[in-house]
Every structure is written in C-alpha cells, then in structure tokens.
Amino acid sequence: MSPETKAYDQKMLKTIDVVKANFASVRAGRANAGVLDRISVEYYGTPTPLNQVAAISSPDPRTLMIQPWDGTLLKAIEKAIQTSDLGINPQNDGRVIRLSFPQLTEERRKELTKQVRKYGEEGKVALRNIRRDAMDDFKKKKKASEITEDDQKELEKELQDLTDKRCKDIDELTVKKEQELMAV
C-alpha cells in the first residue's frame, strides 16, 4: 500500500469503528451495557456519559443494573433512560436502577434489522466520501505535476480496491449483526 493511500485507509478504518459502535448500540435479545453508551446524564450542569457516573452490571442475561456513585443521580439517570430511544422502562428501587430487556418480538427484530442496514449503508456512504476526497486530492497532485498520470491511475485503482475491501468488511459486519438479531 502506498503512503498516499495509507492515510485514507486509516480514515476508512475509523469509519468501520464507528459502524461497529453503532451496531453495539442496537440491542439483541440479551442485556448489553453497550446500549447505554449514548445516554448522557446531567451531572453538575454538564452532560456526562452514563458509564462515567455509575457502575453498570448484568446480574442475569436479560437485566442491566445501574448503580450510580452519587445517589442523587438516580432520578436524572431514570429520566435520561426514559427519554432515550431504548424503549425500556427503568425500575428505580432507591439505590439502583434495573433495566429488564424483554424477549424481542418478530416485528421489533425486523425494525432493528432495518436500523442495522441503515447504519451499514451510512458507513459505506462515508467510505465513498473518503474515496471521493482522495480522488480529488490525486487529481490536484496531478494538476500540480506532483505525480504523473500513470501514478494517478495506479493510486486511483489502489484506492478503489481498498474501498471495495472496506465496503465488503461493512457488509460482513452487517450480515453478522442481522443474524445475531434474528436468532431467537
């Protein structure tokens, strides 16, 4: 891989990491603390990620337990979960908050599968945008006589192969997450 395309490959890998993070936020049938990663709580006037103000554990496969380090945060955490798109009602017992994940219905599984496909497609669009930026960069270098036309063609082919490979990686991740969601 040439040094010119290596920088763009790094950007593509970061995009794939974002897609993986998005997939982790889509819950499958079991409790996963990753679904809480996007939830922020007002803590002394500052929006703070939930995992920085509380211990999150999973006592059983269908339950998450959130134990804030500052007891005064219970109400704020409960409110943040209710206003999020999780679709789960938190149970507050005065010390901890429990989230019970119900078995996914067929309809909900299909909705989540659509969401996963959307995240995958957004990732591939981002990869194509990176490719477009790189192609523009190569054309500018050619125009400025920094590279030859043959170099430009070779870089563009290398970049296209790289883009195809990264898109295939996202497709594989998408299929894997869909299978995880559809497994009963």
Image: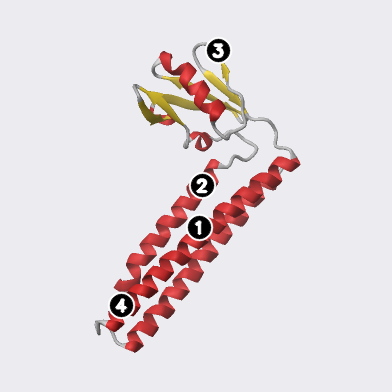
Q: Position of residue 147 (x, y in %)?
A: 28, 83
Q: CA distance from mark 3 to mark 4?
A: 62 Å
Q: Residue at x 46, y 63 (%)?
A: 127
Mark 2 Cα-neighbour bin, 10 Å: few <14, some 14–19, many ≥20: some
Secondary structure, mark 1, is helix
Is the C-beta separation of discs 3 and 1 under 8 Å?
Answer: no
Q: Vertically, is 49 above or below 142?
A: above
Which tag, 3 or 2, sits closer to the chain's start? Answer: 2
Which marked residue is nearer to the observer: mark 1 or mark 4?
4
Is the C-beta separation of discs 1 and 2 under 8 Å?
Answer: yes
Which tag, 1 or 4, sits closer to the chain's start? Answer: 1
Q: Amino acid at mark 4?
A: Lys
Q: Vertically, is 53 above or below 145?
A: above
Q: CA distance from mark 1 to mark 2?
A: 10 Å
Q: CA distance from mark 1 to mark 4?
A: 26 Å
Which tag, 3 or 1, sits closer to the chain's start? Answer: 3
Q: CA distance from mark 3 to mark 2?
A: 30 Å
Q: Position of residue 54 (x, y in %)?
A: 42, 24
- The residue that mark 1 highlights is 123
Q: Amino acid at mark 3?
A: Asp
Secondary structure, mark 4, is helix
Secondary structure, mark 3, is loop
- Determine whether, in the image, residue 142 is placed left or right of residue 107: left
- Determine whether, in the image, residue 20 is placed left or right of residue 154: right
Q: Which quadrant of the figure contains the N terminus?
A: bottom left
In the rendered structure, find residue 93 and report the number of the disc placed on it: 3
Q: Residue at x 25, y 82 (%)?
A: 144
In the rendered structure, find residue 140 and report the number of the disc placed on it: 4
Viewer-nearest residue: 140 or 167: 140
Q: Amino acid at mark 1?
A: Gly
* Extreme residue in the top direction: 94
